[in-house]
Each structure stands twice: as C-alpha cells, then as structure tokens.
Image (spheres, rainbow, N blue to C red):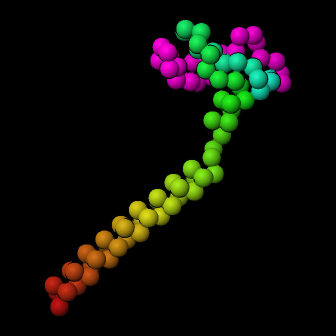
C-alpha cells in the first residue's frame, strides 16, 4: 500500500511499507520513500499526522469568524456612509 508523503531527501511524494501490510497493520511498521528508500515515519505516526487536529479546526473557525466580522463591519460602514451622503 502506498502513502502520500513529502520526502526530505529526494522530494518524492509516495511511501510504502517494506513488506505487505496485513489486514490489521501495526503502528510500528516503517514507511519508507519508494524512490530513495529513506525512512519517513512509522505507520502510527503517519496516521496521527493525517487525522484532523481539534485545535487547528478551532483556530480556522476563529479566523473565519473574525474575517466575516471584518467584512460585515466594512459593509455596514459603507452603507452608513452612503446613508449620510444621501441625507
């Protein structure tokens, strides 16, 4: 089975396990670059990197809310300015 990576040695983007992964793969199986053979990570560490991080989601959500608030304030400011000119 192949796993997407970014090899620091050759820049290749695929890794595989040395032996075929069984139906129940072990966390300690090594992932190596398919191009140069450089050890990349264990299967368990790779899976942890792929799972969503709750703090990352929280930060993205907060950033999105702040951006929406800035856009809203700018829109309200423009409407308010237009209203003053008309009056």
Task: Residue 1: tell me if it is visible.
Answer: no
**Which of the pair 30/34 is nearer the observer?**
30
Left or right of 3? Residue 36 is: left
Q: Which residue: 71% across, 10% down?
A: 18
37 magenta-colored: no
Q: Is residue 13 above or below residue 77?
A: above
Q: Which residue: 47% across, 18% down?
A: 11
Q: Is residue 48 above or below residue 64?
A: above
Q: Which residue: 22% across, 80% down?
A: 81
Task: Residue 87: tell me if it is visible.
Answer: yes
Where does the image place residue 46, in percent across and percent down from the top left?
A: 66, 29
Q: Is residue 57 above or below residue 74?
A: above
Q: Main secondary structure of the magenta part?
A: loop
Where does the image place residue 47, in percent across and percent down from the top left?
A: 68, 32
Residue at the extreme bottom: 87
- Read off the magenta span: 1-24
Where does the image place residue 87, in percent across and percent down from the top left?
A: 17, 91
Where does the image place residue 68, in percent across and percent down from the top left?
A: 42, 65
Numbered-mark total = 0
Q: Which residue: 53% across, 55% down?
A: 59
Quadrant of image for the N terminus = top right
**Which of the pair 68/63 is nearer the observer?**
63
Left or right of 45? Residue 64 is: left
14 magenta-colored: yes
């Amino acid at each position: 089975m192949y796993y997407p990576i970014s090899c620091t040695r050759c820049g290749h983007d695929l890794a595989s396990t040395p032996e075929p992964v069984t139906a129940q793969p072990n966390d300690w199986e090594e992932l190596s670059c398919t191009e140069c053979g450089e050890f990349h990570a264990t299967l368990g560490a790779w899976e942890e990197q792929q799972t969503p991080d709750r703090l990352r989601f929280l930060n993205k959500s907060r950033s999105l809310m702040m951006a929406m608030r800035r856009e809203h304030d700018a829109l309200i400011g423009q409407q308010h300015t237009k209203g003053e000119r008309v009056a």
